[in-house]
Image (cartoon, rainbow, N blue to C red):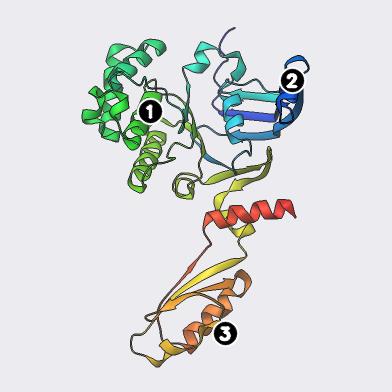
Amino acid sequence: MAAPEPNADAPAIRVRALSKTFDVPVRAAGLRSALTSIVKRKTRAVEAVREVSLEVAAGEIVGFLGPNGAGKTTTLKMLAGLLHPSAGQAHVLGFVPQDRQKAFLRQITLVMGQRNQLLWDIPVEDSFERNRAIYRIAPADYRRTVDELSDLLDLGELLDKPVRNLSLGERMKCEVAAALLHTPRILFLDEPTIGLDVTMQRRIREFVADYNRRTGASVLLTSHYMADVEALCKRVVVIHHGRILYDGALSELVQRFASHKTLNLELEEGDEGAGTDLSRYGEVVSSGAGRASLRIPKAETPATTARLLSELPVKDLTVEDPPIEEVIERVFSAEAE
């Protein structure tokens, strides 16, 4: 099958009513049920993904959010061609993913934070060399890419170490580098920073942002770390029970589902205002040493802020939106209601 003609105006990823249903074996506990299941196997249908539709533009980074079991990984696997959909259509760079055409596979990558692609008992660079052979990367291009990735991710002395001797953070850096040796145009990142310390999470985020800027690659990112999403994604898709609840700007999600704001204030040191009962202004989240945080209904924020500034000796005051985790939780609560 011939590769599709490139279209600069077409989205990099286009999904229409994509669904996936699994037949899951079921049986009661006990020996009798176990023996019966050998002869007569019972299953039940589980809808992992239900009529998901979305588009991702070339060069766009989109956060794909939801709780465990929401259908995020199943969707990514269908877009990467690892699973066949039960219904609906998906096109990635104009290709049908489940056809697994070589031209398609050379332009995508899937990084799963809980899965290894590096060989456990050999040095990292030998695994890189294996990927060079699989993707038929020219030696000069391979060497240049390895050098660039080594500089950006500070791989340095890791390349000649067996994978089993690496820490989790070191291994994840090498996993990301291995997945990008063929300079893919589409990145499916499934929890790429899971289990990493804060410093390493930031390093991976910075690298993904830099790779996106340099190559114009499209990125579909799942993560339970909201810092990943806030740092990388202007747009988010929220999925729950296999269907999309929200698709739009991250800032609009906060505006739509955040019913409260947090006011952080600092009072003039030694002033009598420091002993004021702040509960009459809003819910006191914390207070002490001339500082306090108040939780205020969003609609009342301007009036409350004006009262605080006029009635108390305020040295500094900031207004913050709630954490993204709280906003996402409200999305799920609204869906349940």
Around disc 1, counting alpha carbons within 10 Å, would you say few (fewer than 14), some (14 to 19), or many (20 or more)? Answer: many
Residue at which label 2 appears: 37
The tag on residue 175 is 1
Element marked by disc 2:
helix
- Can residue 253 be seen in the rendering of this structure? no
The tag on residue 280 is 3
Q: Is residue 234 above or below residue 86?
A: below
Give the spatial CA distance, label 2 vs label 1.
Answer: 40 Å
Quarter of the figure with the N terminus:
top right
Query: Who's the residue at 27% across and 21% down the image?
Result: 144
- Mark positioned earlier in the residue sequence (1 or 3): 1
Report the amino acid beneath label 3: Arg
Residue furthest to the bottom: 272
The image quarter in which residue 54 lies = top right
Give the spatial CA distance, label 3 vs label 2.
Answer: 65 Å
Q: Nearer the viewer, residue 148 or 228?
A: 228
Query: On the rendered structure, is 107 left or right of 98?
Result: left
- Can residue 13 be seen in the rendering of this structure? yes
Give the spatial CA distance, label 1 vs label 3.
Answer: 53 Å
Query: Who's the residue at 32% across and 19% down the image?
Result: 121
- Mark positioned earlier in the residue sequence (2 or 1): 2
